[in-house]
Structure formats: structure tokens, C-alpha cells
């Protein structure tokens, strides 16, 4: 067991060296984040030149099977089997910490790149609900998430070492990242009851009479009604539209009446902005990738700021970390809502932390959100199973005192309250540092104060403002934010990654750390290749038809990105899916069947034993990491 050096660094991986090899598509996101966290990825002097071969390969859409170094000048190991990326961090008194990343655990299951992982895990099905048929995301969503998970696994392993545990190996895969991304939709599909609203095509964005495409957001039915009344929409359409609009975060579609789209198209953008101003709703014009590239400030997706030092708070008997539970013995207080912060805390719990969820008196109302398993929301269970719960009224002085007392004995306090709320309640990092100078205070927000005049920091508004709505669709599809909660999920993954970085920094410096992550950071990480293309003056969007599945007699298939142009030449509509796949294989082309209903994942032979059920009977996806 190593004795890691104690430093005064503000980057948790400073002094560690990274060796990396494998498919560039898998390496790129992980290596970029490890560099930002301070890992040395070059054998010679550091340079500002960005000659990263993996980035260029990702940007050009090259196939995933290429074994290459992580970038020019980077230390590389053997290329292995061409399907596995390997990352090793060493130095600064740590024993080597290793991670392996694969597309999937089984070479024969047809998952060999981003497109086939999206197809098999149900991402295409969920993203395509708005359109009525499976659609591939034109961004590399699964591999971006996989890179974040790989970094999180490495950070967790180093943290275990720093706390006296053994060095170990961690592995993850794009397959598991994809299943995690659809875990809420899978849970709902396997619930005891049906959805509260219809699953059917439809949803935002809207278009004004002068051609402005925009996203609408409000969390209040009164504001929704006032907005549409100001635009003179039919009363029945306004009333019928609220419920599918409200549930679109859960269902990835919003089949509200066409009259609402018709109403929007009869008014100018200026009139629509006025209706939003008087109603309390918010609207956001869909920005382009070129616009986002021009304003991007280049900031990392999270920030880490040490703020003090003091004795580490401990409660109860110490629990030593292990290779399988690297966060054992640590306590996380989570005051989260919706997806972003609860998912981040859920991942920390999977790594062994004791997670205590702070809920309002009477409990989290989202526990009752349909559909349910054993009386509890299946979606809520997907994010919160295994957590303890403490009901605390933070609106009262007594409740706030209680929360500060709990924070005095915790390692992490994590929340995603509205901007300014923590400070107004006396529960910001400065307030809690006064009772626990060694606390890692983590905020997962929307904009990180980096965008002027930013709208409400929710998933779809951030997608609209940052160009994700354009990047997610190829050139022959109109830009539209995905109604799959892309940024909430990726933001949750990056929130956990940031907390792990903060915990490791605390171990190396003795200081408490303020950690900030955001949906904006998730959006920029997801669109990074497209933004680089825009900055080079190239077309930032993927070509027409990119990742569009092919119809068969009884379903859909998705070829790998590299095989897609050749596969599109075959008419497979008269063939059953199995025969269509066989025909493509006979011609040397790789493809896999598209999962069209998340419920089918339970019995999919590509995921044998992967989908289990929790104590309430809700479907549960496998942990994203394996430790040895």
C-alpha cells in the first residue's frame, strides 16, 4: 500500500502520470478530463499545442476499432485487443491505479462503437420517442458518459489508496454507461402500472411566425396557462397540453395538442418574449453551434476551490475502504431534486459511501410520481434506492440548525437548489465550513455563472442555449433538444466525478473543498467535437442520415458508423431482423438490433443477467464499474 504525498496543489492529480492506449473513441473524453485534473500525459515538456490524435479521430467520425495512442507525445502501452482502452495513473506516492474501458463485456454481442451501443441499450428508442421511431443521437453520448465513469473509477481508486486502502483495477464499458443513461425509462417500463400520460410522438420546440425556433420552460401550471392565454391559444388545448408538457422529463415525449404549435406560429418572436415576461414562463431561442463556439470561455466543466483546513469529521466506527467499496466510511448528505444531484449521490453510494438524503417534511413528493413499484415511484427508485432519508424543514431555523449539525459530521454536502437559495438560507459553503472545515461542499447547478442573461437552468433550456439541439441531430433534421434528459444524466455523472476529485484533493491537501459542476459543463463536454469543428470553420453537424437506423420487416437495425454508408445500400425491409443482420455480416458489415422498448432489455440476450430487480420489484441496471 502506498503513502501518497501530501501537497498544496489545487489539482487533485498533480504529480501523477498517465499512460493510455486503445480505441481513440473510448480514450478521448477520459484523457481530456484527466488532463484537466492535473495528470501529466506527456513524456516531454508540457505544450499548449493541441495535437491530440484521439480528438481528431473522434471529430472525423473514424471507426472505433483503431488501436492508437491517446495523443501525440502521450505515454502509451500496448494496444491490446483493439476493443479495450487502458488507463494507468502512477506517481506522487500512489501505487499504479488502472482502468480498462470497453464497448461491451462480450465481443460477440454486436456492440462495437457509439452507434451500436446507442441502439442496443435503448438510447435510440428513448431519444426517438418524440419522432415516433428510433433515432440515433448525432453526438457521442455513450462514450462521453463512459469517459466520465472511467475517470470517476480512477479517482475512487486513488481516494481509497489515500485513505489506507489497497490499489485495485477498475473496469467500465459504454454498454453499462448506456444502460445507466436509460435506467429511469427502464424502471418505468417495468413498473406495476402504466405511465400517467400517453407515450406518443410530439413535443417542443416551437417556431414563431418570423422563423425563430424556441424552447419553453415553466414548472408552474399557472405560468403555463398565462403564457398561452397571452397568445390567445384555445383553452382546451392549453388545459390538455400541461400534463404531457409537465411529464416530458420522465417520458421523453410530449404529445400535446397541435393547436399550441399553430398558436406559436401565428405570433412574432417579440410577441412571444412579451408573453413569457408577463406570465413568468421562460423562452429560449435555439442557439447554433457556431454561436456557442464563438462565446465559449474554455473553462473546465467543474471547479475545485480549497477553502480551509481542519480536523476531519468522523461519525461512528471507522470503515476501511476496499477495492470493491472505495468510498466505504464516507458520509454524503444530499439535498437534491429531480435528476442531477440525486444521480450524483446515487453513484457515490454505489462506490460505498453512506448517502443520507435530505427531504422536506412528509418526504420527497417525487416518491409518488407514477408509475410505481410497490407503491413507490419506479423513476425515483432508479436514482435513490439504497439511500437513507432524513426529513428536515430547511425553511425553519430549527431545521437549518439540524442540517448544519448533520454537516458537521459528514464528508460531503451535495445539492442542486436554485441559484442563491443556499446563501439565503445560511447553508452555503462558507456557512457549513464554519462547522466542518474539512467538508467537500458540492453544488450541481445549471449555468455556473458563465453565461450572461441565462434562462432557467433546466435540461432542455441548457440544450437550447448551448447548441445541443443542433448537435444532437444530423444536418437533414431540424434542430431540436432531445426530450431524453441528456444533460441531467450527464450532469449527474459529472457531478459525481467532481465530488470524487474534491475528496481526493482534500486527502492530498488537508483542506475542505468547494466543488461546482453544471449542466453547462455537461453540454460543452458533449458537444466538444462539434465545437472544435466550428472553431476550425468546418461544418459542425454530422451529415444527413447520420446514425439513422434501418427498417426491417419486424424492427430496426443499426450499423456501426464505419459500416453505415455501405449498409444503407441494402433494402432490408422485407427481411426479419435476424436475417437482415446475417445478410450484412455476410458482406463484412457490422450492425446490431435496435431495442425499441426499454422493457425488452430484461430478456435481451446481449445483456445476460444485467437487469435485476430491487427490493421493491423495480428494474435496476448493473453498477457502472467493476473493481478487482
Image (tube, grey):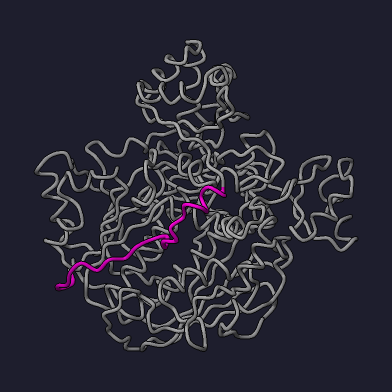
Q: Is residue 176 visible?
A: no
Q: What x and y, as percent, mark residue 550?
A: 79, 45
Q: What x and y, as percent, mark residue 523?
A: 49, 52
Q: Does the magenta segment cover residue 72? A: no
Residue at x-position 37% and y-position 80%? 14
Tell me: residue 563, above or below residue 362.
below
Choose between 389 and 534: the one closer to the eye: 534
Choose between 549 and 50: the one closer to the eye: 50
Asked whether, in this view, residue 469 is left or right of residue 61, the answer is left
Q: Does the magenta segment cover residue 300? A: yes
Choose between 202 and 160: the one closer to the eye: 202
Asked whether, in this view, residue 275 is left or right of residue 320, the answer is right
Residue at x-position 56% and y-position 79%? 20
Q: What x and y, as percent, mark residue 424?
A: 17, 44
Q: How many marks?
A: 0
Residue at x-position 25% and y-position 60%? 441
Magenta residues, start to end: 289-312
Residue 583: quarter of image:
bottom right
Q: Is residue 345 visible?
A: yes
Residue at x-position 75% and y-position 55%? 592
Quadrant of the snapshot with the N terminus: bottom left
Tell me: residue 193, above or below residue 307.
above
Amino acid at each position: 500500500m502506498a503513502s501518497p504525498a501530501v501537497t498544496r496543489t489545487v489539482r487533485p492529480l498533480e504529480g501523477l502520470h498517465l499512460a493510455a492506449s486503445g480505441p481513440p473513441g473510448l480514450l478521448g473524453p477520459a484523457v481530456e478530463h484527466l488532463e484537466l485534473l492535473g495528470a501529466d500525459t506527456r513524456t516531454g515538456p508540457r505544450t499548449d499545442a493541441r495535437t491530440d490524435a484521439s480528438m481528431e479521430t473522434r471529430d472525423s467520425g473514424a471507426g472505433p476499432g483503431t488501436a492508437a495512442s491517446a495523443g501525440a507525445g502521450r505515454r502509451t502501452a500496448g494496444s491490446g485487443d483493439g476493443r479495450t482502452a487502458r488507463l494507468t495513473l502512477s506517481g506522487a506516492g500512489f501505487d499504479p491505479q488502472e482502468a480498462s474501458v470497453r464497448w461491451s463485456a462480450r465481443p460477440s454481442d454486436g456492440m462495437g462503437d457509439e452507434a451500436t451501443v446507442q441502439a442496443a441499450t435503448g438510447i435510440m428508442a428513448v431519444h426517438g420517442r418524440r419522432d415516433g421511431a428510433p433515432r440515433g443521437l448525432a453526438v457521442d453520448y455513450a462514450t462521453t458518459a463512459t469517459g466520465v465513469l472511467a475517470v470517476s473509477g480512477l479517482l475512487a481508486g486513488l481516494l481509497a489508496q489515500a485513505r489506507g486502502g489497497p490499489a485495485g483495477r477498475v473496469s467500465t464499458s459504454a454498454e453499462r454507461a448506456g444502460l445507466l443513461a436509460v435506467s429511469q425509462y427502464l424502471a418505468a417500463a417495468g413498473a406495476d402500472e402504466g405511465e400517467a400520460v400517453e407515450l406518443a410522438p410530439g413535443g417542443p420546440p416551437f417556431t414563431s411566425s418570423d422563423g425563430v425556433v424556441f424552447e419553453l420552460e415553466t414548472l408552474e401550471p399557472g405560468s403555463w396557462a398565462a403564457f398561452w392565454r397571452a397568445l390567445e391559444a384555445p383553452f382546451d388545448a392549453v388545459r390538455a397540453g400541461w400534463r404531457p408538457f409537465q411529464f416530458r422529463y420522465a417520458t421523453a415525449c410530449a404529445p400535446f395538442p397541435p393547436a399550441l404549435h399553430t398558436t406559436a406560429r401565428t405570433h412574432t418572436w417579440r410577441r412571444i418574449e412579451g408573453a413569457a415576461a408577463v406570465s413568468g414562463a421562460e423562452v429560449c431561442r435555439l442557439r447554433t453551434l457556431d454561436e456557442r463556439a464563438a462565446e465559449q470561455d474554455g473553462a473546465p466543466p467543474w471547479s475545485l476551490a480549497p477553502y480551509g483546513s481542519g480536523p476531519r469529521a468522523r461519525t461512528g466506527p471507522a470503515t476501511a475502504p476496499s477495492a470493491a467499496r472505495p468510498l466505504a466510511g464516507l458520509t454524503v448528505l444530499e439535498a437534491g431534486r429531480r435528476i442531477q444531484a440525486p444521480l450524483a449521490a446515487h453513484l457515490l453510494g454505489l462506490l460505498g459511501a453512506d448517502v443520507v438524503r435530505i427531504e422536506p417534511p412528509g418526504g420527497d413528493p417525487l416518491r409518488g410520481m407514477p408509475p410505481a413499484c410497490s407503491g413507490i415511484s419506479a423513476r425515483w427508485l432508479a436514482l435513490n434506492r439504497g439511500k437513507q432519508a432524513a426529513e428536515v424543514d430547511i425553511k425553519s431555523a430549527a431545521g437549518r440548525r439540524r442540517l448544519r449539525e448533520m454537516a458537521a459530521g459528514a464528508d460531503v454536502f451535495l445539492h442542486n437548489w436554485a441559484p442563491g437559495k443556499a446563501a439565503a438560507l445560511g447553508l452555503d459553503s462558507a456557512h457549513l465550513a464554519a462547522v466542518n472545515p474539512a467538508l467537500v461542499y458540492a453544488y450541481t447547478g445549471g449555468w455556473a455563472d458563465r453565461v450572461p442573461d441565462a434562462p432557467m437552468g433546466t435540461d432542455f433550456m441548457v440544450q437550447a442555449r448551448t447548441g445541443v439541439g443542433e448537435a444532437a441531430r444530423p444536418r437533414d433534421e431540424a434542430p431540436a433538444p432531445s426530450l431524453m434528459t441528456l444533460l441531467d444524466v450527464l450532469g449527474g455523472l459529472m457531478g459525481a466525478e467532481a465530488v470524487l476529485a474534491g475528496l481526493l484533493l482534500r486527502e492530498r491537501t488537508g483542506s475542505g473543498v468547494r466543488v461546482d459542476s453544471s449542466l453547462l459543463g455537461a453540454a460543452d463536454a458533449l458537444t466538444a467535437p462539434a465545437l472544435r469543428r466550428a472553431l476550425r470553420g468546418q461544418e459542425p453537424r454530422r451529415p444527413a442520415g447520420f446514425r439513422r437506423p434501418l427498417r426491417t420487416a419486424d424492427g430496426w437495425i443499426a450499423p456501426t458508423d464505419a459500416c453505415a454508408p455501405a449498409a444503407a445500400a441494402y433494402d432490408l425491409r422485407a427481411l426479419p431482423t435476424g436475417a437482415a443482420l446475417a445478410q450484412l455480416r455476410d458482406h463484412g458489415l457490422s450492425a446490431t438490433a435496435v431495442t425499441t422498448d426499454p422493457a425488452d432489455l430484461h430478456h435481451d440476450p446481449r445483456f445476460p443477467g444485467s437487469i435485476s430487480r430491487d427490493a421493491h420489484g423495480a428494474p435496476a441496471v448493473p453498477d457502472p464499474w467493476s473493481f478487482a
